[in-house]
Amino acid sequence: MIGRGRLPLSVLGLVAAAFLLSSCEGLGGISPIFPTPVSPNGQGIYNTYIGISIPAIIIFIGVEAALLWVVLRYRRSKQPVGYVPPQIHDHRTLEISWTIAPLIVVLAIAGYSFVELQKDFLPITNQQMTVVVSGHQFGWDYRYENGIVIHQEGTLAGDVTPFVVPTHTLVKLQFQGTDVIHSWWVPAISGKTDAVPGYDNYSWLKIDEPGKWRGECAELCGAGHGTMQIIVQAMDQHDYDIWVRVQQSGQHAAAPSGTSLG
Ligand SMILES: [Cu+2]
């Protein structure tokens, strides 16, 4: 049985552990499914996730602790035979407050998320370069302004041709679909963006460190959906310029070694 005063202490301990875990670099924060963000919009989505999760965990623990307390403290065996607890009906203040309180929580989550989504998926105008990302059954094409087109054909092997971007560069992403709806998703970089036939969607990325990050199509699009792997590779400007020249001369670009998947 839980002694008096012990329960609030253990609740505090759990909350402290949650905060500590959320600041742990490399583990991906409080949830191991969330990778360390490398683009500001990925960071924004991560912050939104943490910003909603921490209060949600606190509310969950509070409600469960109150429930346990009532169940243990006021259990039938502790009461005299025939005991009936106080009966409360039509308590207007209580009923209004337990309607308003969850409404405030849900509206806060909606507002917070909406503001973040506005930042991530508006067609920006201050970009340094634009890439048109086009989804098809089953793969992605990346069209650069300098005429380079990268075909990232789907494979179950996982090692697809990387979509290469220079570091420290704000890249506008314009999404299109040629057959059915696909969804471009690299969790470390940005949220899921639908690639829809006949309607352009937008996102962006800005990566400040060289490396490779994985993603996949996040919209069931047919039998080869699972093969629509994505690899985004960021190179510093010097390596990127070499990569561009290699692409333009029609040769096959060999990815520089020493970079590992993040
Ligand atoms: Cu797809």
Image (cartoon, rainbow, N blue to C red):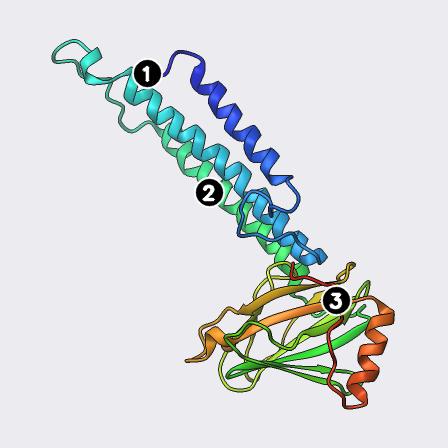
**Three-letter residue code for mark 2:** Leu
Distance from mark 1 CB to nearest ligand 1 atom below 8 Å = no
Q: For numbered disc 1, what is the local secondary structure?
A: loop
Q: Earlier in the sequence, mark 3 or mark 2?
A: 2
Q: Which mark is residue 103?
A: 2
Vertically, is 194 above or below 135?
above
**Three-letter residue code for mark 3:** Ala
Q: Position of residue 99 (x, y in %)?
A: 40, 38
**Left of 223 or right of it: where is 14?**
right
Q: Position of residue 181 (x, y in %)?
A: 50, 78
Q: Position of residue 156 (x, y in %)?
A: 50, 75
Q: Which mark is residue 234?
A: 3
Q: Residue at x 31, y 21 (%)?
A: 70
Quadrant location of the C terminus in the rendered image = bottom right
Q: Which residue is disc 1 drawn over? A: 1
Q: For numbered disc 2, what is the local secondary structure?
A: helix
Question: Could you tell me if the residues under marks 3 and 1 are in contact, i.e. CB atoms within 8 Å?
Answer: no
